[in-house]
Amino acid sequence: MTIFTKIINREIPADIVYEDDLCLAFKDINPKAPVHILLIPKRKIPTMDDLVQEDKEIMGHLILKASDIARQQGLAQDGYRIVINNRENAGQEVFHIHIHILGGRKMSWPPG
């Protein structure tokens, strides 16, 4: 069980900004930008490599919700970054797919 599963199950607290039947979004406890929200599917999918054809609906839902959440957080006009880290070398720490929604400051490129 991951920390994200515990958040979904309300076993540990989180500052939730959005929830529906398929996903949950909450503020990152170690933010890398003024706005840093994590968006997760409620069904655990460990990595991008574990996705199957049937997951296209949930992944599409997550991307659309990320955009909605960014707008709700006031990020749309100035811009925001959407990040999915996949496996250790990419920086994935929790093996439950999650989208980082980052904004509120100018981002640099390339990222670390």
Image: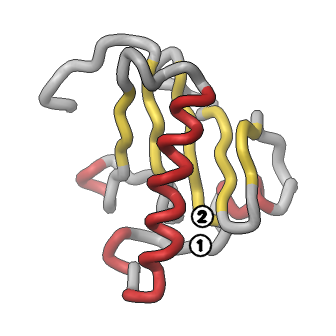
Q: Is residue 81 left or right of residue 33?
A: left
The percent coordinates of residue 29 (x first, y second) are 63, 31
The percent coordinates of residue 9 (x first, y second) are 83, 62
What residue is shown with label 2? 41
- Please name the residue shown 32% across and 76% down the image: 49
Helix, strand or loop at label 2? It is strand
- Please name the residue shown 41% across and 18% down the image: 77
The percent coordinates of residue 44 (x first, y second) are 59, 73
Front-most of 66 and 40? Answer: 66
- Please name the residue shown 86% across and 54% down the image: 10
Front-most of 44 and 91? Answer: 44
Q: Is residue 23 left or right of residue 112?
A: right
Helix, strand or loop at label 1? It is loop
Q: Quadrant of residue 52?
A: bottom left
- Please name the residue shown 54% across and 30% down the image: 71
Q: Crowdedness of circle 2 by 10 Å Cα count: few (<14), some, many (20+)?
A: many
| Quarter containing the C terminus | top left
What residue is shown with label 1? 44
Q: Residue furthest left?
A: 110
Front-most of 60 and 17? Answer: 60
